[in-house]
Image (cartoon, rainbow, N blue to C red):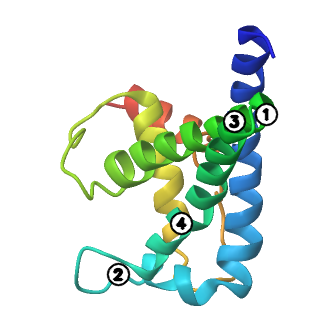
Amino acid sequence: MSLISFVSLTLFVFFLMEGITWLTHRYVMHGFLWYLHEDHHKKGPGFFEKNDAFFLIFAIPSWLCIMLGMQNEIWWVVAVGAGIAMYGFAYFLVHEIIIHQRFRLFTRSNNTYVRAIRWAHKMHHKHLEKEHGESFGMLLVAKKYWDKVRDEKNHR
């Protein structure tokens, strides 16, 4: 497998993961695995949440693809695992650090994208139950949230 093919497949999987994450969040986390995700919407005491188990649900296939692909020199499998891992890192950065600020960085960002993803996620969390949710994606933000942030910025 050429380096260009490897990088292309890795990036393809990275972007594909946004759709997979949307579907997983909408139909699994707000569906039959709500019992793991619920404490993310109804914050309790402590740093860790049952919701953090989803890290393993995505990390294990990534790790297995990378490890088994490298052991067997099946480089496209490694690329798939790398794409999942890259998305996992981006998810951690955006969701845990920028949005929920579980680690206190980027607390005062006035960046339009950061404000739009925070607003979209705020609208997601206004629903405390698994039904009637909105904004299930992570990195892509619907136009209505961009418009809301731009309108606020223009009225300052």
Circle 1 residue: 74
Residue mark closest to the camera, 2 vs 3: 3
Q: Position of residue 130 (x, y in %)?
A: 64, 83
Residue nearest the observer in this picture, 119 or 68: 68
Q: Position of residue 38 (x, y in %)?
A: 51, 84
Mark toward the start of the polypeptide (2 vs 3)? 2
Q: Position of residue 132 (x, y in %)?
A: 69, 77
Give neighbour class at mark 3: few <14, some 14-19, many 20+ (Cα, 10 Å). many
Mark toward the start of the polypeptide (1 vs 2)? 2
In which quadrant is the N terminus drawn? top right
Asked which secondary structure carries label 2, the reply is loop
Give neighbour class at mark 4: few <14, some 14-19, many 20+ (Cα, 10 Å). few
- Residue 43 shows which numbered tag? 2
Q: Is residue 98 left or right of residue 3?
A: left
Residue under the image location 73 percent in, 20 percent down: 6
Q: What amino acid type is highlighted by mark number 2?
A: Lys
In three-dimensional space, the C-alpha distance between marks 2 and 3, rounded to whole angstroms, equals 36 Å
Q: Quadrant of residue 3?
A: top right
In three-dimensional space, the C-alpha distance between marks 1 and 3, rounded to whole angstroms, equals 7 Å
Q: Are marks 1 and 3 in contact (CB under 8 Å)?
A: yes
Residue under the image location 65 percent in, 53 percent down: 64
Circle 4 residue: 56
Query: Taking 3 as reference, is 78 above or below it?
Result: below
